[in-house]
Amino acid sequence: MIIFPAIDIIGGKPVRLYKGDFSTAKQVSADALETAISFQKAGCEWIHMVDLDGSLKKEPVNADTFISVAKETSLKVELGGGIRTMQDIDFYVNNGISRIILGSVALKNPQLVKEAVAEFGDVIAVGIDAKNGYAATEGWIESSDVYFTDLAKRMEDIGVKTIIYTDISKDGTLAGPNIDQLVEINKAVSCDITASGGITAIGDILTLRAEKLYGAICGKSLYEGTLDLREAVEVCK
């Protein structure tokens, strides 16, 4: 299982949110690149980054920050937030981003996902974020009546190979991941499933690994010190 340490960006600075609420944004480190380098030193191969400003503005906002991490470290960057067009995807891919996460457009514009997968293949991942099991969009502000596994199946049919699943009620809470929903989506599709939201301690990592998840995104647990990143990476080798 791959450990993805997370850096969410607002105004060029690393922040964390509580349950996706932008009013709870708290800066967690001084510099994204320095933080990314510390993740690299801990043995990580990947990093998960989100353009939170982009999510709200529906266009890339903090591109320089993500590109600098891709160019100045050996980490492979997976990036989501505000990516809405083929031009956005092409720009990031040509500037060293290893994986592009399409979120809101998966629900609102599945044709774009289809075109992106046809053009870029496994570089394209889909982020499914849910409240009470139903997909939410636009920085988690809008809800829908689409059940999370139904959306996952649609994405699988399009050709998506990687899905990041977030239970919004768990995000930033340090309350443990939603194992039941993660197992449900992992069984529903053949895609690689990355768990996001609520991961707190090494026990959560071991549980997710035992359930054969592809990856685990760790954010607040690293900044609050409840999870040792080097240990997490080691147990997943």
Image (cartoon, rainbow, N blue to C red):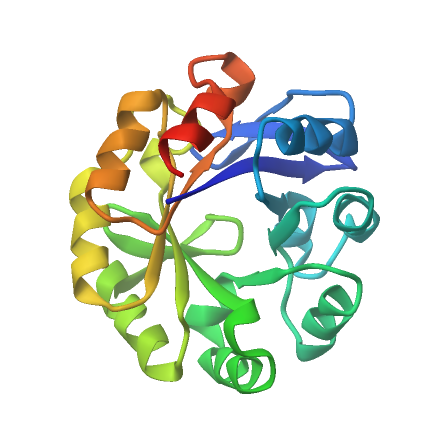
In the orientation shown, which residue stands out farthest toward the top?
225
Q: Where is residue 177 in the image (x, y as percent from the top left)?
A: 29, 33
For image coordinates 38% across by 24% down, the residue present is 173
Query: For this view, does 19 lie left or right of residue 29?
Result: left
Q: In which quadrant will I find the N terminus?
A: top left
**Observer able to see residue 175:** no
The quadrant where residue 150 appears: bottom left
For image coordinates 44% across by 22% down, the residue present is 231
Q: Position of residue 229 (x, y in %)?
A: 50, 24
Q: Position of residue 56 (x, y in %)?
A: 63, 51
Query: For this view, does 109 lie left or right of residue 10?
Result: left
Q: Where is residue 28 in the image (x, y as percent from the top left)?
A: 64, 20
Q: In which quadrant will I find the C terminus?
A: top left
Q: In this view, does 108 lie above or below 198?
A: below
Circle count: 0
Q: Is residue 90 above or below residue 235?
A: below
**Observer able to see residue 27:** yes
Query: For this view, does 134 lie left or right of residue 215?
Result: left
For image coordinates 78% across by 69% down, the residue present is 94
The quadrant where residue 30 appears: top right
Considering depth in this image, is 149 or 56 the residue closer to the camera?
149
For image coordinates 49% across by 61% down, the residue present is 103
The quadrant where residue 151 appears: bottom left
